[in-house]
Amino acid sequence: MASKALFWNAVLVAAILSPVAATVAGATQQDPSSTDSSQQTPPKPDAAKQQEEIKKLPPGPGREELVRVCTGCHLLSVVTSQRKSEDGWTDTVVEMRNRGASASDDDMVKIVEYLAKNYGPNSAPAAAAAPASSVKVNVNTAAAAEIAAGLGLPQSQAQAIVDYRAKNGNFKDLAGLKQVPDIDTAKIDAEKDKIEF
């Protein structure tokens, strides 16, 4: 099975490199207060939103493992909004394991196979099957990946929204959202029915 071999190769490389990476990271990190905010542990996902995301997952082998292993740390839409090859999903799963995801090797292989099948580069986004009016994005709480997927924005603009709200506080209305530098205001207007504050 190709995915099992890919997974084991990625695990082997990660096992070899993780002590080196930890040493390099420890050597370069001089001030604990200056850690990169992207490396901080994200808050636990909202339980109600997570249940909605779980309902959207297609059935099949690996679905149960994905829900059990991946829902404790981040909203599933962060995962399902992406389209990756089997190699890409293997790298992601290995990285999540290195960050603390706990599952057997067999479970990890099933997760990679499920993601590659249902969220590969040629698979249709699940959100496309849902009526556009039913998919809402709260720009005050959503992660950048959720904003990008829900509003059809480039990842850089979605991240700019998250960074702007972190610096300036929550958005109150559409006019406030349009104050984000380099944001596509025409796209924001076009998607305004999907935006929640």
Image (tube, rainbow, N blue to C red):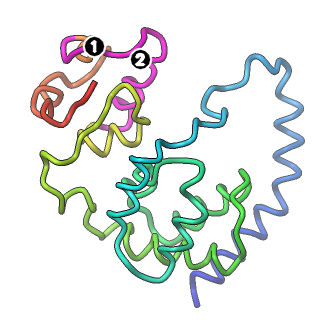
At x 18%, y 63%, the residue is: 129
**SS class of the residue under badge 2?**
helix
At label 1, which amino acid type do we have?
A: Lys
Q: Quadrant of residue 79?
A: bottom left
- In this view, the residue in front, 172 or 13, is 172
- Above or below, comparing residue 2 to residue 169 in the picture: below
Q: Amino acid at mark 2?
A: Arg
Q: Which residue is mark 1?
A: 172
Distance from the alpha carbon under mark 1 to that under mark 2: 10 Å
Q: Position of residue 83 (x, y in %)?
A: 38, 60
What percent of the width, then of the height, locates residue 192?
14, 30
Residue 99 located left or right of residue 181: right
First in sequence, mark 1 or 2: give its number.
2
Location of mark 2 (residue): 165
Looking at the image, residue 88 lies above or below residue 171: below
x, y percentage for residue 163?
A: 45, 21
Q: Nearer the viewer, residue 67 or 13?
A: 67
Q: Quadrant of the C terminus?
A: top left
- 64 relative to 188 in the view: left or right: right
Residue at image location 85% in from the left, 62% down from the top: 16
Q: Quadrant of residue 174?
A: top left
Residue 152 image point, x, y percent: 24, 42
- In magenta, the rendered stretch is 154-175
